[in-house]
Image: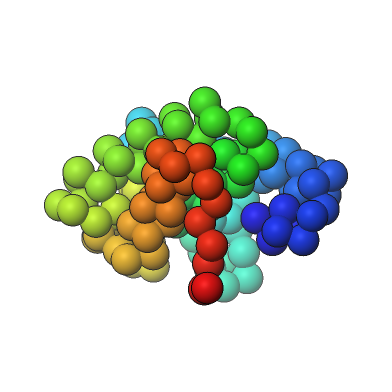
Amino acid sequence: LFLLARGDRARAERSLDYTLRTFARRGGGLPGFAPYAGAVADYPDQDFSETLFAEGTAGVALALLRMGRAREAGELSAALRSLQRDGDGGVVYAVPASEDFPDLAAAAPTAWLLFLERERRDHRRVVFGG
């Protein structure tokens, strides 16, 4: 999203392709994206590569939409909507749950889903912070 905002579409496409290849996962039977690919220094004894991270998934969906890949963005939007129903109104943070990635409703993924769905509906970019 940052690269697109700066007008650097070529690098944005490469970044999105890397993200799709590296972080795509299914969590709870739903398509989405992991927060990490394998172990990381902050969590040396844990592997979150099979965790569906809702906030990141929504960000990827918004990038897909802005890159003209509306069908893929729509599939992720539907998955996030499913997590919203499971979260009793808000989108759950992650599935499966862990101590640092709970399956509780959270503001950030809920807001990202609202941005995504507004852009899908209105065919206009949401402007952040202004």
Identify which residue is drawn at 57% across, 39% down. Answer: 65
Q: Quadrant of the N terminus?
A: bottom right
Q: Position of residue 77 (x, y in %)?
A: 40, 38
Q: How many marks?
A: 0
Find residue 97 and report its image quarter.
Answer: bottom left
Vertical order, 32 against 4 (above or below): above
Which residue in the rendered view is the most extreme toward the top?
71
Q: Position of residue 11 (x, y in %)?
A: 82, 49
Find residue 102 and report its image quarter.
Answer: bottom left
Q: Position of residue 111 (x, y in %)?
A: 37, 60
Vertical order, 31 against 10 (above or below): above
Q: Nearer the viewer, residue 40 or 30?
A: 30
Q: Is residue 73 left or right of residue 87?
A: right
Find residue 85 and report its image quarter.
Answer: top left
| Colour mapping | rainbow
- Can residue 114 be seen here? The reply is yes
Which residue in the rendered view is the most extreme toward the left?
88
Identify which residue is drawn at 44% across, 42% down. Answer: 122
- Can residue 52 be seen here? The reply is no
Q: Is residue 14 left or right of residue 73?
A: right
Q: Nearer the viewer, residue 47 or 23?
A: 23
Identify which residue is drawn at 64% across, 33% down. Answer: 68
Q: Nearer the viewer, residue 130 or 58?
A: 130
